[in-house]
Image: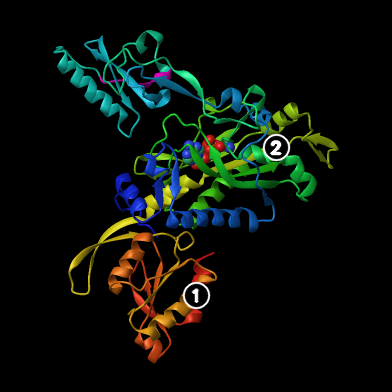
Amino acid sequence: MPDPTASPVSMETLVALCKRRGFIFQSSEIYGGINGFFDYGPLGAELKKNIRDCWWDDMVRRRDDIVGIETSIIMHPRVWEASGHVAGFTDPLVDCKVSKQRYRADQLFFAAVVVDGNTVGYVSALESERTTEALQESADALKRKKAIQGKLEPVQARDMTEAKPDEIALIPSPATGEPGSLTAPRSFNMMFQTNVGAMTDASSVAYLRPETAQGMFADFKSVVDTGRVKLPFGIAQIGKSFRNEITPRNFIFRSREFEQMEMEYFIHEDADWAKCHREWINWCKDWLLSIGLPESHLSEYDHPKEKLAFYSRGTTDIMFRYPFGVQELWGIAARGNYDLSQHEKFSGVPQALFDEATKKKFIPHVIEPAVGVDRIFLAILCAAYVEEDVKDDKGNVEKRTVLRLSPRIAPVKVAVLPLLKNKPELVARAEALHKKLQRKYAVFYDESGAIGRRYRRQDEIGTPWCVTIDFDTIEKDGLFTLRERDSMQQRRIGEAELFALLDEKVY
Ligand code: GAP
């Protein structure tokens, strides 16, 4: 389990590890990369698959009230009119006319520099953990540069969506440090557009989905009519979503192509939605703990009522302490019956169910836990990364990098290591075990280098166990040496016990 008291790993260190060990690469790197898109390498693809599989198993297969579906990425464009995305899925955008940089207005902060009650200029800073401090430092520097005497007042940080029209020309661009080049915020729709078919006119416009959720709403009736489901029940899906984010950042935290795991839990219109909402928040938290995230890194954030969409009854985010700050990991929203009502209105196809008790029709309400696979991936790496000092065989202190990944999530579950590669009997036994384990688990076979070095290589990618085949295995007891990643302790273990251990821990 990760150590919650450990000092957080820097993003630089994590990105370097991901590249060095084949977890994540920049997409199209040989062409200079493309901002906001990433590739998962051999270990990353395994780890990501494990996150998906655990979620699917726990959310869908191990429950009787939830079914899983897989819908198309490009849907009828009317879906996105009904959902409100065509009109309203926008971020406020600010351009710098000189540098050609683009900023999200709500992430670009500014403040008036006030000396003895008089505004003597403006400063700006991009949102960070220390936005206000950065603005205060810039205000101080501006006062000194202009050689103004008097008392500098504490800055009041505001974001660009709050800038008055006459202030915009006075706010310096973060790119140039000079005022006069920033534009007023304007709405920018984040959906990627494409055209379907040979024509590229208005009639062929379609969108890459910005969320998987609408697939569940659009297919609601089909699932009800074919799936033998009964309220309350959920429809879940895992799949890619696309958002033309103005400022993709923090590695895979905010990217333009990402993967979501969403579930729409439909309840009766008279059901206790607040209780159901709470139950799903708890479920999501417990699930995050089950895949190894430490409770100390998790917190909850309730969206203020006045900032909710008019149809929303409440949204709570499970937040995670990333190295760049506490940020949203998983949103759990009580969305009323807005989505199904909208699809009924736009498609003309009734979405209501019949209540046998009241003999009335009603449109179910929904609770929606929505999370990004990539954000979980990043949270897992941040929490799991540890550097520690350990002693080698000769008592020398050396640095050990370990990913303390849960066995459920680890990309390699067990490494099989023959003690020596030039002893055919050791190699043959190791290969036989490797083949047998491979039928059920992701296993790594490694025969090159000193055994200590091989252990370190596995520590760095989070392999929970190494199994060494030595001369005692062949000549005496048939047992292997099992070495545990976190404690580094070793013990002798037989094949049946090894399979039992894996069966218990990898589920
Ligand atoms: N259907 C609701 C919905 O999509 P959201 O808060 O926009 O809600 C849900 O997205 C989750 O998807 C977020 O909590 C986050 O984990 C993930 N997510 C959203 N935008 C993302 C992005 N640009 N990059 C990576 N993950 C993202």
Quadrant occupied by the C terminus: bottom right
| Residue 175: percent from left, percent from top | 30, 23
Identified by mark 1, the residue type is Lys
Q: Nearer the viewer, mark 2 or mark 1?
A: 1
Q: Which mark is residue 389?
A: none
Residue 145 forms part of the magenta stretch: no
| Residue 251: percent from left, percent from top | 39, 42
Q: Nearer the viewer, residue 474 or 203?
A: 203
Q: Quadrant of residue 395?
A: bottom left
Report the residue at 51% width, 32% height from top.
303
| Residue 161: percent from left, percent from top | 43, 19
Mark 2: few/some/many CA within 10 Å (<14, 14-19, 20+)? many
The answer to whether 434 is drawn above or below residue 17 in the figure is below
Q: Which residue is mark 1?
A: 435
Residue range in magenta is 154-161
Q: Nearer the viewer, residue 205 or 316?
A: 205
Element type at mark 1: helix
Q: CA distance from mark 2 to mark 1?
A: 45 Å
Say whether residue 338 is left or right of residue 146: right
Residue 158 forms part of the magenta stretch: yes
Report the residue at 29% width, 50% height from top.
7
Q: Which mark is residue 218?
A: 2
Element type at mark 2: helix
Mark 1: few/some/many CA within 10 Å (<14, 14-19, 20+)? some
